[in-house]
Image: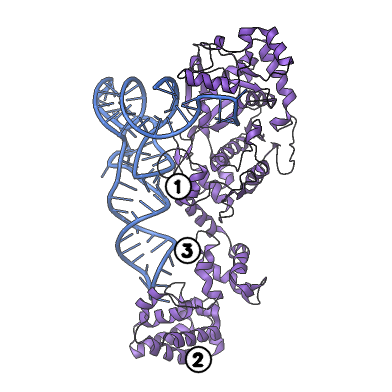
Chain colours: A purple, B blue
Amino acid sequence: MARKVCVRFAPSPTGALHIGGVRTALYNYLFARQNGGTMLLRIEDTDSTRFVPGAEQYIIEALHWLGIQIDEGICLESPDGKGPHGPYRQSERREIYHQYVDQLINSNHAYYAFDTPEQLEAKRAQIPNFQYDARTRMEMDNSLVIGMDEARKRIAAGEKYVVRFLIEPNEDITVHDLIRGDVTINSSILDDKVLYKSADDLPTYHLANIVDDHLMEVTHVIRGEEWLPSAPLHVLLYRAFGWADTMPQFAHLPLLLKPDGNGKLSKRDGDRLGFPVFPLEFHNQKDGTVSSGYRESGYFPEAVINFLALLGWHNTGDQEMFTMDELIQQFSLDRVSKSGAKFDYEKGKWFNHQYLQLKSNKELAQLFMPVLEQHIPEFNGGRTGVEAIVEQVIGLVKDRVNFVSELWEQANFFFVAPAEYDEKSLAKRWKEDSPRHMTELLALLESVDDKDWLTPEGKTAEEGVLNTLVMNWIASKEYGVGVVMNAFRICLVGAARGPHIWAITDILGKQETLRRVRVALEKLH
RNA sequence: GGUGCUAUCGUCUAGUGGCCUAGGACAACGGCCUCUCACGCCGUAAACCCCGGUUCGACUCCGGGUAGCACUACCA
C-alpha cells in the first residue's frame, strides 16, 4: 500500500530564507509535483530565543515569488495554515508534543534531567569530550539516578528540567539515504539528546520533527546534508514511538559552498563578494540589518530557479535551460550530486541574461519604466514620446545586458543628450579633421528631406537614404568611413559605443540628431 | 579529537568496465563579424586527488591513504 507522496519544507523563522534553503524547497517541490504528491510548509519555531519577526512572512513571500507552490500548511492564501494536520506552526502544537513526550517517558525511552546549563558547561570543561550518554548519565542529575517519584516531586515543585532520549549504546543503526545509499553509525557516538525543554515548554527540533512528520504523513524527508549525522537519531526515535514501518524515506542534499575558499555559503559571503544570498531583500527587525535579495537585484524568478536547480542536480545530456515544468518532469533524486557545489554567481548572471532575451520588448519596457522614472527627472510618469521609443530602444540593446537595470547604461543616450564626452573615446576617435567632417556632415544631413530620414519599413539601416547619402559623400571626399562615423557617433552618444548608427538616428530623429552634432561642434571644436 | 559524507577542467557538471584522443556550460583567452561598444558565431587553453588491487581492459569496481566538508548545544 503505497502512501501518497508528501514532502515538507520546514524552515525556522530565524531570519531571511537562505538561498540553500530555497534550493531545498525547490527540490522538495519538484519531487512532490513529479509524484503527484503534496508540498507542505511547516514552521519550526521551537527556539523562542532565535525567533525573528517577519521571517515567516518573508519565507512564504519568497517561495511565492519563485513559483514554489504550497499545497498544505502555512502559505500566502492561508497564513495560519490549511490542511487536515494543523496547526502547522510548532509553537502552536505544544499539547501534541506533551503527549508524545509522555509516551517516551512511560515506555522508558526517555527520562527527566535536571542538570542546569551551567552544570553541563562545568562538566564539559572538566571532562574532555564529555557526552551525556550511557557512560555518564548515571553520574548526572536525572530521573534514572534519583528515581521517577523524586523527579516528579521536583517537577511539581516547579524545578526546570529537560527530557532526554535514552540511547542504548553500541548498536549499529543504518539509515537508507535516497542519494547516498546506506549510512551506518554506532549508537555509542550519539548523546542522550534533549527532546523537550520545560523552560519554554517546547520540544527541540528532533522530537518535533519526528512527531510532526509522522502525524502529517510525510513520506519523504528531503533536507540538507547537515542533517545526515542526526538521521540515525531520528530513526531511533521512529522506532521508540513504534512508527518504524511508516518512517519516511530520507534524502540528504549536498551543501552550497562558498564561491571561493572553503566552507558552506553564508550570509557574510554575499556581503563580502557582492551578491545576494537571499531571494528577497530582508529587513531584519531584530538586529536592524538589511540583506539584499535576488528579486531587488533584478533577477527573474525563473532564472533563479533554473540556476539553483542545476546546482547539485543535472540530467544526462547537455540541456541547461529548464522551465519549471521541465524540471518537474526530469528531476530525480538519484541524479542529485553527492558532493557540495560551489556557488558560482557568474553563472547566475548568465541565466538571467538568457531569460531576459526571452522576454518581449513590451514586457521589458514595463519593467524598465521605473528605471527611466528614476533617471529622467522630467519623465514624470511618461513624457510624451518616450513610451513610443522605449520598446524600440530595448529591442536594440537588450542582447547586451543581464539585468533590466543595465538597460539604462546601454540606452541612456536615447533619452538624454550627452552632457560630456568620454575621454578615451575622444582620444581614439575624435581626430583633427573631425570638426571639419562634422561640419560638412551637418550640412549634408540638413539637406535630407524629413520624409527620407527614417529607415523605410522592412529595410535594413544600410538600405536607407541616409546611409547611401553619407557613404557616397565619404567616398567622394575619400575620407575614412571609420573616422567619420566614429566622430558622428561621439556627437550622438558621447562615447564610442552603442548600436548601429542609423538605428540611433532613426530613434533620435532629424532635429535631435542635428542638434547634437551642433552642440558637439561647439564643445569639441 | 571523534563520527559521518564526499572527491572529473578555475566553477557547475556528463560519464554507471571498452563508445574517452574524457563531452557540455559559465568564466578566461584568441579570431570572425564591424563605423564603435556589445551580442552572436568559430576556435584555444583547461580535469579523472594519490597508491595499490580486481580485470584482457579502469574515470568508472574494491582496499588503503590524502584532502575537503558536515555534525559533535536545553540551535535548527
**Residue A17 % position (x, y):** 59, 42
The chain letter under disc 3 is A
* Amino acid, disc 2: Glu
- Helix, strand or loop at label 3? It is helix
Report in which chain the residue with disc 1 lies.
A
Can you tell which mark lies on residue A344?
Answer: 1
Q: Nearer the viewer, mark 3 or mark 1?
A: 1
Q: Could you tell which of marks 2 and 1 lies nearer the N-terminus?
A: 1
Q: Residue at x 62, y 73 (%)?
A: A377
Residue A400 circle label: 3
Residue A101 place in picture, x, y as percent: 68, 18
Q: Is residue A138 above or below residue A428?
A: above
**Cα distance in 3D space between marks 2 and 1:** 53 Å
Q: Amino acid at mark 1?
A: Asp
Secondary structure under tag 1 reads loop
Q: Compute the Cα span from label 3 to label 2.
A: 32 Å
Q: Nearer the viewer, residue A328 or A400?
A: A400
Confirm whether residue A266 shows in the render: yes
Residue linked to disc 2: A446
**Residue A83 horizontal side relative to residue A421, left or right:** right
Q: Residue at x 50, y 48 (%)?
A: A270
User: Could you tell me residue A207's position as x and y percent?
Assistant: 63, 23
Q: Earlier in the sequence, mark 3 or mark 2?
A: 3
